[in-house]
Image (cartoon, rainbow, N blue to C red):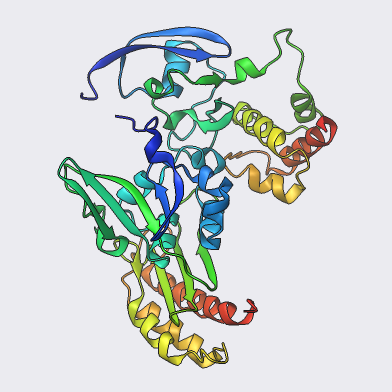
Amino acid sequence: MSLRRIESLCRIETVPEGLRIGAGCVIAQIWADKLATSIPLLGKMARAFGTRQVRNRATVGGNIASGLPDRTLAVCLLALDASVHLKSLKGERIVPLEKFLVGAKKTALTPEEMVIAVTIPQVKGFQDYNMIGPRNAQFFVTVSMALVVDDTNKKVHLALGNAGPIALRAHLAEDFANTAIDWKKQQVNAATAAEFGEIAAKNCNPPSDATAGENYRRHAIKIMARRLLIKAFEEEPR
Amino acid sequence: MSAEEKISYTLQINGKSHKVENAFYSENLLDVLRYRLGMTGTKFGCEHGQCGACTVHIDGKPVCSCMELAAVVAGSEITTIEGYNKPDGTLTKLQQCFVKHAALQCGYCTPGFIMSAAAFIAEHPNATEEEIREGMDGNLCRCTGYGRIIAAIKEAAEVSK
């Protein structure tokens, strides 16, 4: 069954909780939308997502509900603390994306429910997405990650792709960084960044497959997380 | 409704109506184009959105026809390479540039590249080489190494301004 022509699923709008993106919105629509790209990570996500042809068709709802660990969108939305709106005849419930993603190809969706939207709270601070993979465009990423720095609440959000059976948040690394970062001076030293990477790489469960082994993925996570954290506090004058 | 059930519908392709009768719900646009309607210009490559050989325009946007259920696009305007070609058999500027730069070897990916490039140039007439490379990220060619294809698209973009 196709939900493509249900207009109410294809809206991007501001709501009290932040930005609401309908589950039927395609990625190309997000890239072209001023409201959506006011969240920098969404613009970066859209650019990194699939190919031009795929972006014209891939929907937000379909991508999240696949429950796959290596999708660009889920990693970015996790780092942005997005929530998922699920609706059935019985009513609507809102689930944090992290709780929605239950396991490999498993989500919190019940058979009666469908994803109707995601909401993304406004966060002020650095945001970036990084991936390595055999191809820039459409292909399973070897490893990906998104880093969001919440300046207001002095917290970092690090989400990892293909570092476990499902896209995941690196909570231990986040907890470490939240206390180790010098928030007053807006600085992070090299040792902190290195440890941030070490903790993230240690506390995940990357697969070994035809693209890369587990050790390679852990190594990549370590280096990418370190570089992203340094970039977050070096490059963005705030 | 199950994947085995059948449906009839009309597709609007290259400005003409085409009746598709008694087709499975699950048939993709690529299969319907090639095997039901005999439009074999659109090529079958990977069948999962990686290679772009099957690119067609749906309401003006490039889309992989292998990943589009045919019944869903009833009511949309579909353009295939047959519709892109000039009716008198002469080549468009983009096609001429492909010939001039020898931007093909086996030619299997070429219809997909032409459809993607035509849409890209229309949207980005001032694209740099880097932008063209990124904009063509949905099409794979296993022969040419891309340099000549990008050069052809760049020249076509310049003369189309």
Residue under the image location 37 percent in, 70 percent down: A214
Residue under the image location 77 percent in, 48 percent down: B128
**Residue A100 point in image, percent of width and height:** 26, 58
Quarter where residue A208 is shown: bottom left
For residue A173, above or below residue A190: above
> Of residues A199 and B122, which is closer to you in this image?
B122
**Residue A237 point in image, percent of width and height:** 65, 79
Q: Is residue A208 toward the left or the right of residue A73 in the image?
A: left
- Regarding residue A135, the answer to whether it shows in the image is no
Quarter where residue A143 is shown: bottom left
- Regarding residue A138, the answer to whether it shows in the image is yes
**Residue B2 point in image, percent of width and height:** 21, 24
Quarter where residue B119 is shown: top right
In the picture, the quarter occupied by the N terminus of chain A is top left
> Of residues B47 and A58, which is closer to you in this image?
A58
Residue under the image location 75 percent in, 39 percent down: B148
Q: Is residue A24 toward the left or the right of residue B91 in the image?
A: left
Q: Is residue A116 toward the left or the right of residue A89 in the image?
A: right
For residue A236, above or below residue A135: below
